[in-house]
Amino acid sequence: MQLPTPLSSPAAGTAAKGYDHAAVQYASDEELLAVGVPFLTAGIAAGEPTAVSLAPERAELLREALPPGSGTHFLPTDDLYARPAVAIRSYRELLAGFVDAGATGIRVFGEIPRAAIDTSWDWWARYEAAVNHAYGQFPLRSVCAYDTRTTPRHVLDDVARTHPFVAVPGGEYRPNDGYVDPLAFLAVPRPTAPHPIQRAEPLVVLTDPQPREARQAVLAANRTGLPAAEIDDLVLAVSEIADNALRHGRPPVTLRIWAGPGCMVVTVHDTGDGPGDPFAGLLPADREVGGRGLWITHQICGEVTLHRDDTGFTARLTAGNPGR
C-alpha cells in the first residue's frame, strides 16, 4: 500500500502557539446550537474558513442555522475519524491548505463519532491530548462537542483534562482550570481492559520472533473472514512492532495472537520502558528511535493500544471487532 509522507512532530514540551482548543459538553440540540452557531458565524463574518465535522443529523442542524451561502465546509466524519493518526494527518493537510490560501484564522466545530468513543476511547483520548501540539502551528480555533446524554462519565473526565478552554453559549471561550498539559496527561499509564477474545488462551505464543516469523504467524492464525487488505495491514503493523521491540525494547519479546470470526488481536510485549516520546504513533518523530514504525502502525491498524506497567511495555493491535 502507498503510505502518505509523514508530517513532522512538534518538539516535545513546546506550547501550541496558534491553536485554541475548546470543548463543549451539551445536553440538548438547543445547547449545541447556542455554542456552535455564534462560534461559526463570528468566523464567517471575519472572513475565516469554517468547517463542521458532526454526525449528519447534527451537521444538518448547524447547516440550517447558518447564514445561506456561508461557505462553511461540512466534512464527512467516517473517513476523517477512521483512526486518530489519520485524523491528525487529514486535519493538518486541510489547515495547511487554508493557510496557503491566505487564511489568518480558521474555525472548526466537530465531534469524535460515537462509535469511536464506545469502542476505542483510550486511543482517542491520546488524540485529544496530542492535538494541542499537532495543530499548534495553525491559526486555529476549534470546539469539540460531547453530548452528556450519551457520553460516558470517564470520557467526559478525559475531555475536561485535554481541552485548555471551555466553549460557552455565545461562541466565547473561557479557560479550563482542569486542563492537564499533554505531556503530563500522556505520561500517566492508562489501564487497558482486555478484549473479550483475550479471555481465552492465545492461539499463538512466540518468544523473540523475527519480523518474518511474526508475519507468518499472523497469516497462519487467520480464521477471521476479514477482507484480505485488512489482514495485510495487520501483518505489516505486527511486523513493524515486533521489529521495534527486538531492536529497541528489552528481551524477552513475547508475541501473542487471538483470532476468531470477524476479529484478530495481537500483543507484542517486552520488558523495557517503551518509546520515550509521549506522542509516539500519533505524530511522526524522526528523532525518535522506532517512531516511523509506530506511525505506520497507527495509520493502517484498526486499533492500537500502548500500555506501560511494571512488567514492561505492550502494544496491542486489533483488526475487526473483537466482540466488545
Image (tube, rainbow, N blue to C red):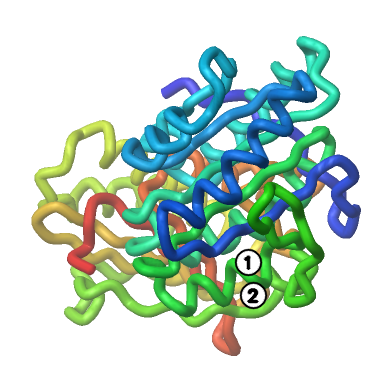
Q: Would residue 323 appear left or right of 187 to someone viewing this image?
A: left
Circle 2: is it few (<14), some (14-19), or many (20+) Cα within 10 Å? many
Residue at image coords 26%, 41%: 231
Residue at image coords 74%, 24%: 45
Residue at image coords 63%, 24%: 94
Q: Position of residue 282 (x, y in %)?
A: 62, 48
Question: Residue 58 lies in what quarter of the image?
Answer: top left
Q: Position of residue 121 (x, y in %)?
A: 45, 64
Q: Is residue 313 visible?
A: yes
Q: Would residue 302 appear left or right of 145 to someone viewing this image?
A: left
Q: Amino acid at mark 1?
A: Gly
Q: Is residue 255 visible?
A: no
Circle 1: is it few (<14), some (14-19), or many (20+) Cα within 10 Å? many
Q: Amino acid at mark 2?
A: Gly
Residue on which the image places disc 1: 249
Of residues 84 and 168, the one nearer the viewer is 168
Residue at image coords 42%, 36%: 59
Q: Position of residue 272 (x, y in %)?
A: 64, 75
Q: Badges 2 and 1: C-beta atoms under 8 Å apart?
A: yes
Q: Position of residue 54 (x, y in %)?
A: 44, 40
Residue on which the image places disc 2: 272
Of residues 89 and 261, the one nearer the viewer is 89
Of the 4 image quadrants, the one containing the C terminus is bottom left
Above or below, 95 against 252 in this view is: above
